[in-house]
Amino acid sequence: MSNSLGAARQRQQSSPWLWPLIWGALLLISVVAMASAEPLFRWIEPDARQVIYGRADFYVLLGRHLLVVGIAALVTIIIGVLAGIAVTRERGGDFLPLVGQLASLGQTFPPVAVLALAVPVLGFGTLPIIVALMLYGLLPIVRNTLTGLQEVDPDIKTAAHAMGMTAVQTLRQVELPLAAPIILAGIRTSVTINIATAALGATVGASNLGDPIISGIVNGNMAYVIQGALTIALLALTVDSLFEVLQRQLRSRLSTS
């Protein structure tokens, strides 16, 4: 029994990139060869004049989708991690409840409501959906950054100070590396959720993979909806599996160091 479990673990460790490659390949096929599935979508919508979304190529929509999610993720990661670091320092401890409440507040507002409030100020286009994704994706990153830093063993930090490390050196060389798997888990949750949420940008003029979904809903064309939803799902699975590999590698490094 132990031999079979060991063999299974060895196979899992020897091919960590298997699922990212599988999901990535399926995503690539769906983006490049969507038109080849026209008979299937014609069966789903036999009365529709057109069953393959053609206002923009799917690879273009994918690029726009990744751009929006990527910008929002980058800004959110910087703000969330820095905020988590700041309030876990001695001088910023008084602001810890406030930061937690503000981060939670972002997820209490539905993204549609954020878009409705942002459009009159920011106008139609990409910027409102980026703001909505930032607010919606902040909580997991802040929460996990706080958890990761607070769970670092105080004895380890004391030992680092005893070795002559400054507070900044302790943070960079001890606390952040130990907290990295937990922080990465928060980033993984934030990005994966926002990949799906970004589709709402199509309602305010931000062209992305949400375009076929919105167009299909408006025109009563289920084939369009399936095409957009399928591509977004494959993108989310690809990105999520990549994060899983990164988390495993981080844990492996920590366990061997």
Image (tube, rainbow, N blue to C red):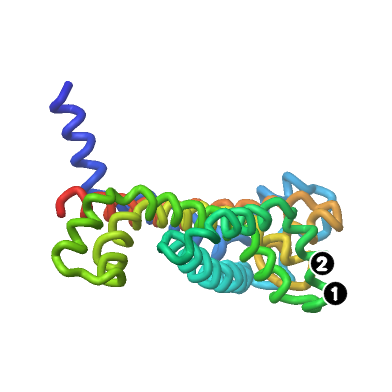
* Tag shown at residue 117: 2
Q: Nearer the viewer, residue 190 or 102?
A: 102
Tell me which amino acid carries mark 2. Answer: Leu
Q: Is residue 14 above or below residue 129?
A: above
Secondary structure at badge 2 equals: helix
User: In the picture provided, is 154 more to the left or to the right than 118?
Assistant: left
Evaluate if marks 1 and 2 touch, with contact meaning CB atoms under 8 Å apart: yes
Q: Nearer the viewer, residue 112 or 30?
A: 112
User: In the picture provided, is 165 more to the left or to the right than 198?
Assistant: left
Tell me which amino acid carries mark 1. Answer: Pro
Is residue 214 visible to us here? yes
Secondary structure at badge 1 equals: helix
Question: Cα distance, mark 1 to mark 2?
Answer: 6 Å
User: In the picture provided, is 253 more to the left or to the right than 180?
Assistant: left
Query: Which residue is depicted at the point 67% across and 58% down?
Result: 106
Query: Which residue is depicted at the point 34% across and 55% down?
Result: 179
Q: Can you tell which quarter of the image residue 199 is in?
A: bottom right
Position of residue 125 measured from the top left corner of the image (x, y, whole percent): 75, 76
Quadrant showing the N terminus: top left
Query: Which residue is depicted at the point 76% across and 62% down?
Result: 114
Q: Is residue 23 above or below residue 84?
A: above
Q: Is residue 162 above or below residue 1?
A: below
Is residue 36 visible to us here? no
Quadrant showing the C terminus: bottom left
Label 1: which residue?
120
